[in-house]
Amino acid sequence: MTGCLIETKGLTKEVVSQFLRKRTCILDGVDITVEQGQTFGLLGLNGAGKTTTIKLLLGLLKPTAGTATVLGRTAGSRDALQKIGFLPENPYFYSQLTARECLLFMASLFGVPKEIARERTEKLLSLVKMSTNANLPMNKYSKGMLQRIGIAQSLINEPQVIFWDEPMSGLDIIGRRDVRHILHNLKEEGCTIFFNSHLLPDVSEICDTIGILHKGKLIAQEKIATISTQGHYKDLETYFLQSIGETDDSTQRLPQ
């Protein structure tokens, strides 16, 4: 498949609180397009609607209005999900399983033949540098180690499209570097990548295009090369702050 692999049109999500039945708009008419092979970074302050957007694109939530398609299929369709990899913001695993058992189990859910699943599991454990600890139960893992396994499981089906929600969360400096290398390799293989992050240096280095969500609205969508010809993340930071109406007034003083 070529062309636009991820697309939303007027995507809107409202929720109604149980208390007082108050209606709140989480996403408001969001239009996003991501072409095949692109790496798209969705930026926004906490509560902007980034995770909600990914959940809608995966079919984990249903939109109040608008449409979302992935790989030419309605978001959440079985055919599309078979070709998607997903890393949630806080991945949760059966803690009594080892990392190796977990990946083999995930492979079985996708119907990967056992011999191929074993080969992929060992390859991915090596990729995320978890081979040494692969036989430990995951209740022994640190947050960073769990994040590495989360990344590995999102690739077990060799997806065409991946959705990662804060992939650098819980990772140290070496972990962040390793994830950047993985993302670069996935790009070279033609994978289409959609991820959320607050870490602008990583976004600036990895992404082709970014979108900025603010109070549920997509207020900007632009190519990184247009924002910063030198690829400096400070240019992206300035662009982000200006887009959401924030200024860095270095002359501002605290009240006396």
Image (cartoon, rainbow, N blue to C red):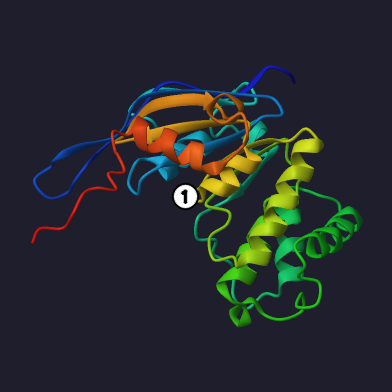
Residue 41 sits above or below residue 156 on the image: above
Place residue 12 in its image quadrant: top left
For residue 192, side relative to residue 118 (left or right): left
For residue 96, side relative to residue 42 (left or right): right
Residue visible at 54% across and 43% down in the picture: 233
Residue at the extreme front:
251
For residue 114, side relative to residue 99 (left or right): right
Residue visible at 71% across and 75% down in the picture: 98
Residue holding disc 1: 198
Nearest to the observer: residue 246 or residue 42: 246
Place residue 247 in its image quadrant: top left
- Residue 153 appears in the figure: no
Residue visible at 72% across and 58% down in the picture: 178
Nearest to the observer: residue 152 or residue 119: 152
Residue visible at 10% across and 58% down in the picture: 255
For residue 205, side relative to residue 118 (left or right): left
How far across and how far down the image is residue 103, in percent?
73, 62
Quadrant placement of the C terminus? bottom left
